[in-house]
Amino acid sequence: MFIALGWAAMTVYLIGHAYMSWSVSYLRSRYYLLNLIGALGFVVSSAAIASWQSVAVNAFWAAISLLSLLNITLERDSPLSAERITAPIFLVAFIGVAWSLINRDLGFSILGWGGTLLYCFGYVLFTAKSIRRKRFLIYNTLAANFLIPVYILQDNWPAFGMSVAWSAVSTYGFWKLTQQEHRAS
């Protein structure tokens, strides 16, 4: 039952992410609602198999989606900036990769926590309109790829499938937005 819930959550999430990534104009409220539904499904299914990175990122994602639906977001001029947030996250990811050469499981876990943080804080920055869609898509591509080894080790196949698809959707969305910008200029 929990595996089926995970696959259903993945489908809802990917529909929302593709909608935001590929639409020329999209309704933020629709995007946030799909994220909320997908996140809650993943929290339950991932908790059932003790996949804690997935629980953390999805609980956070659900909270931010709910707040955004209620029009409660950080102000654009908040002290959060992409550089202040992402520099330490990329350091964590680098440490995870390096540590995986010594201890694969621990190193991948550290890398996965870097991906979890990048997903979470990237989403906060995006909902606060502190970063644009293209940068958000880059963060999503990287975060998804940071988490893939963790999900393989945890046998969390719905989260693995979502990460692979999420990375592809984000990459294509970034490419599509770049092409639109080039045509406009």
Image (cartoon, rainbow, N blue to C red):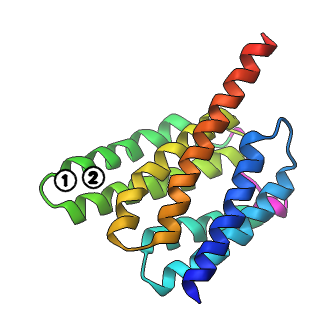
Prevalent SS, magenta region: loop
- In the displayed orientation, state which residue is furthest to the bottom: 1
Q: Are marks 2 and 1 in contact (CB under 8 Å)?
A: yes
Find disc 1 in the rendering and name its residue. 99
State the quadrant of the N terminus: bottom right
Residue found 81% across the figure and 40% down from its top: 23
Residue 95 or 88: which is nearer the viewer?
95
In the rendering, at what x and y percent does residue 109 appear?
A: 31, 63
In the rendering, at what x and y percent does residue 185 appear?
A: 77, 9
Q: Residues within 10 Å of mark 2 (few under 14, many from 20)?
A: many
> What segment is highlighted magenta in the picture?
67-77
Residue 37 or 4: which is nearer the viewer?
4
Determine the secondary structure under disc 2. Answer: helix
Residue found 12% across the figure and 56% down from its top: 102
Can residue 152 be spotted in the picture? yes
Residue 117 lies in the magenta stretch:
no
Find disc 2 in the rendering and name its residue. 96
Determine the secondary structure under disc 1. Answer: helix
Give the vertical position of 160 relative to 184 (above or below).
below
| Tag 1: amino acid | Trp
Q: Residues within 10 Å of mark 1 (few under 14, many from 20)?
A: some
Query: For residue 137, which quarter of the picture?
Result: top right
Can residue 81 be spotted in the picture? no
- In the displayed orientation, state which residue is furthest to the top: 185
Query: For residue 162, which quarter of the picture?
Result: bottom right
